[in-house]
Image (cartoon, rainbow, N blue to C red):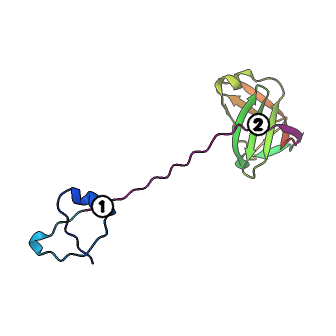
Amino acid sequence: MARLRIAGTTGLVALAGAVMAPVSPTPAQQEFAQVTIQQTLIIKRRATAQKPLKWKEKKGPKCVALSQIAGAAVVTDDAIDLVTKSGDRLRARFSSNCPALDYYSGFYMKPTHDGRICSDRDVIRTRSGAQCEIDRFRKLVPKD
């Protein structure tokens, strides 16, 4: 193990760029120092404007298992989009407008006895207490 004799704080600065040579000091002359060299790399990427995806609606399922829903988003006052754990995107269309849905930016789904949410049977509840009946599900696919 190489031992260094460093005198004062100027020795610390010189240590970073100097070639180190082993020294055998006597026990009374031993001094210890710690040198930390840090390096930071900053990568900046220019933001590019991406066009929002356009979706095309196709025929969807009658029911969706609640356990398969990974996320949801309010898109209009007559529909919400659901994202499944498999990555599919579905749009739940309501039988009529649900204006309080967009205002409060959220909704509730009450679990059913069979663990599914079905069109022409189930409703979602807005945060204000209104109920919106699901008319049908549509599968969403990106437009070309």
Dot 2 or dot 1: first in sequence order is: 1
Q: Amino acid at mark 2?
A: Lys
> Which of the numbered marks, if any, corresponds to residue 123?
none
SS at circle 1: loop
Magenta highlight range: 34-60
Local secondary structure at mark 2: loop
On the image, numbered disc 2 is attached to which residue? 51
Task: Tell me residue 136's x, y (percent).
Answer: 85, 36
Instruction: Examine the structure image and report whether residue 109 is included in the region drawn in magenta.
Output: no
Q: What amino acid is labelled 1 in the image?
A: Val
Q: Is 76 above or below relative to 53?
A: above
Between the residue at mark 2 and the residue at mark 1, the CA separation in whole angstroms equals 50 Å
Classify residue 128 by image quadrant: top right
Q: For the point 31% across and 65% down, which residue is it?
A: 18
Quadrant (top left/top right/bottom left/bottom right) for the C terminus:
top right
| 59 in magenta | yes
Q: Nearer the viewer, residue 114 or 41?
A: 41
For this rendering, which residue is in front, 133 or 19? Answer: 19
Camera-nearest residue between 41 and 115: 41
Give the label on residue 35, or none.
1
